[in-house]
Image (cartoon, helix red, strand yellow):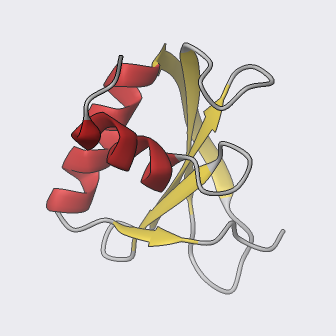
Amino acid sequence: MQDRSDRAADASLHPHGGEGWLVNGEQELIVQFRPLGAAPQTQWVELRTFRWVRPHPPVPQSQRRMLRSSAIDAWQHMLKVGWRRCAAPVR
C-alpha cells in the first residue's frame, strides 16, 4: 500500500495518461516520463531526454528505463533542483 507522499508524487508524475514532462531552460533540456505499460501503475517508467533550443523541435539525447519508485524519486529531486513541469512540446 502506498503512503500519502507516494500517492501525491504519482498524481504529479502521471497527470495525463501516465505521462509527465519536466523542462530546464538553463540547460535547454526537456525530459519525458512515460510508463511502459497500459496502466499508470505499471512497474517500469521510460525517461526520454531531449535537447530543446526554441523555436526548433526537441532533439532526442537519451532514453532509459527505471522502476516507477525510482522515477518518482527522480521527478521529485528534479523539481527540487529547479526543473519545472510543462506540457509536451509541439513537434
**Furthest residue toward bottom:** 55
Q: Residue at x 55, y 58 (%)?
A: 21
Please tell me which residue is depicted at 35% across the width and 49% down the height of the picture: 8
Q: Position of residue 87 (x, y in %)?
A: 63, 72
Residue pictured at 71% horizontal, 77% vertical: 56
* Left or right: 11, with 33 as reference point: left
Residue 86 relative to residue 83: left or right: right
Q: Position of residue 38 (x, y in %)?
A: 81, 24
Image: 53 above or below 59? below
Q: Foreground residue, 14 or 67?
A: 14
| Residue 67 in the image, given as x and y percentages of width and height | 44, 15
Give the x, y percent position of residue 35: 64, 29
Q: Is residue 89 left or right of residue 26?
A: right
In the image, residue 29 above or below residue 28? above
Q: Is residue 81 above or below residue 7?
A: below
The quadrant of the picture occupied by the N terminus is top left
**Quadrant (top left/top right/bottom left/bottom right) for the C terminus:** bottom right
Q: Image point 23% across, 41% down: which residue? A: 5
Pick the residue in front: 68 or 56: 68
Q: Residue furthest left?
A: 81
* Res. 52 image quadrant: bottom right
**35 or 65: nearer the viewer:** 35
Say which quarter of the image contains residue 29: bottom left
Query: Total of numbered circles in the picture?
Result: 0
